[in-house]
Amino acid sequence: MIISALFGSETAEKALLYLENYGSAYPRAVARTFDLAVGQVQKQLEKFEREGVLASRLVGRTRVYEWNPRCFYLAELRGILSKSLKQLPPAIIEKYFKERTRPRKKGKPLP
């Protein structure tokens, strides 16, 4: 995509863009969205957590990663990611970043 050289790998870039777009993530969701191996995504998210960029918590048996509010350069990092998301072609945004995240109203017809 756009900034993979900055983060060291495409997997790292995709995981961070996913987090910027959705706010939180778990490894399997990121892997499924981008058709990546779950192990690759887990390594990247664990690396970012170790460095203090992300924080995680268990929700049931699933580890969910979110932005660490204590990271002193979080605003700048999220600014770069936000600008990167805005520069993506519409086809890529539609393919990867338009997943429905809330339930549909009961009885509402599908589009």
Image (tube, rainbow, N blue to C red):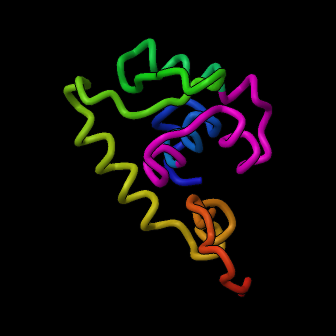
Quarter residue 36 falls in? top right
Answer whether residue 23 is magenta in the image: yes
Give the quarter of the figure containing the C terminus.
bottom right
Above/below status of 27 relative to 57: below
Q: Where is residue 70 drawn, in percent x and y?
A: 23, 23
Q: Main secondary structure of the magenta part?
A: helix
Above/below status of 38 relative to 110: above
Closer to the camera in the image, 89 or 68: 68
Q: Which residues are magenta?
A: 18-41
- Residue furthest top in the image: 50
- Residue furthest front in the image: 106
Q: Where is residue 41 drawn, in percent x and y?
A: 66, 29
Q: Where is residue 31 drawn, in percent x and y?
A: 73, 39
Residue at 45% of width from left, 67% of height from top? 87
Above/below status of 17 relative to 64: below
Closer to the camera in the image, 14 or 2: 14
Quarter residue 77 falls in? top left
Above/below status of 68 relative to 92: above
Residue at 65% of width from left, 32% of height from top? 27
Q: Where is residue 26 drawn, in percent x and y?
A: 61, 34
Residue at 54% of width from left, 30% of height from top? 64
